[in-house]
Image: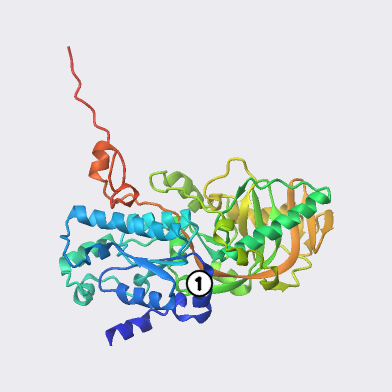
Amino acid sequence: SDDNDIEKVFNFPYLSDAVAVQFLNDHGRVFFIVRGLPGTGKSVLSTMLMERYPTHKIYWADKMFMTPVPIPRTPDTLRESHKLCHEKIEGFMQKNVPVIINRSTNVRVSEVSRYLLLGVKYGYTTILADTSYKFSIVPEELAATNTKRLNLDYMKRRCAQWQNVYPIYTGWFLCPSDALFLFKRFSHILDLLNKSGWSPPKVLHQEGQPFCLGRRCWFGIASTEKEYCDSKEVRDAYGSVHTLKVVGFAITHEFAVAMVMLDEGQARLLGHRDADDNDQSVSDLFSGLSVKDWQPTRCQVELSDVVEDDEDDQDEDTPITGGVENIVASDAVSFVILGSCSEDPKVPLSASKDLPGMWKALCEKMSISERGVMCEEKISVGDAVAYRAHQDYLILDKGVELEGVFTGYYQPYDTKIDKLCRNFARTGKCRFGNSCFFKHERTVTYAPATFE
């Protein structure tokens, strides 16, 4: 049948790879955002997700119209349906539903961003189940294949509105219980350092959703990052699960991080390149994006609140390796941000423009060369070896292997081509709030001048 043929097309790792499906079922906080134009198999893709993830909850905007008594589709009822969908998804997250699926059309960035905001706010690992990865967006073909009998003019209009959604970073997202384990191990190391007479900077703000940093993409503003996100290698790996080797920790004046030794395949997937202080994508992010375009959002849940008690102590279940005796400058090292040592950190923490150059900076401060760590200040703390250079610390610990799903770290953002909400523009108010279909921006009107 046609549906069976489409199922073969949707061979995404989070559907076809048994390891990935098992990991995501066990994860505890996964949010699938299904998106695609009519005629691209959203219903089939959603059904496949529901079958793979039996603990799911699903909702979409059109569900409001699927009632015994038909509800007319008007601009007001359409906005009401999106408001209801937004409320339902947020309600699922507030109840800590382990797998949530939204299957609205989600054509434009502004439509997706309202759900990206919820994912960040409640600490959900977000995966975009995007049918456009497998279907070309051709109005004539979609007009012939969509099941709602939408005509060619409609499909041309919707195809013209289609926008790709890009993350701030790609990376590997841990399950909450593994992330909490890292925090506990790090806290244990800190206690040992303090007892040894060393006083590293205090972590003042804990990261609510730690993940292993991949490549900085900055919403795909720079053409090189857009090409990277759209590349076959990244799309094929999206939603796959990798084993990460955590080899220690580092503390600087700004961050506390876990250090991850990437293997050859992981480093190749990121297309590793040295950070440049004059990187165009950095300047674009901070000068080209205004607050209206990007809503910097932080996770508002604590890991200890979402990890069940029986998951809380998992030392015996965590694979321990031999760690590394030394580390060299040419190693492919990435980081899991555990928290900020700054009193007034940038939100989110991954927005810091210093992150891509962090390994290079550590190598300079700790005198790390191809011969290893040459830093003179060195002590043993339990199973770990700690180095200190001024107020920066490097700890090589026993190795820990954790799994992470490769996806994007998304933040809610907008584009400059979306239309304004007329009600908000006139009055500064909108009854649909954050779920409004249009951009909230007030237009200023001036009374005509009077002359005496």
Q: Name the residue under label 1.
A: 24
Tell me which residue sits at (45%, 70%) in the image. Answer: 231
Q: Which residue is drawn at 74% across and 46% down?
A: 391
Q: Between residues 433 and 98, which one lies in front from this camera angle?
A: 98
Query: In the image, is 278 to the left or to the right of 252?
Result: left
Position of 18 relative to 269 (above/below): below
Say which residue appears at 32% left-offset and 62% top-offset. 106
Residue 306: x percent and y percent?
A: 54, 60
- Left or right of 436 in this view: 406: right
Q: Residue at x 28, y 62 (%)?
A: 61
Q: Is residue 446 above or below residue 5?
A: above
Up-down relation of residue 154 to residue 288 (above or below):
below
Secondary structure under badge 1?
helix
346 above or below 7?
A: above
- Asked which quadrant contains residue 38, the reply is bottom left
Could you tell me residue 442's position as x and y percent? 30, 38
Let me know if residue 109 appears in the view.
no
Amino acid type, mark 1: Leu
Q: Position of residue 293 (x, y in %)?
A: 39, 47
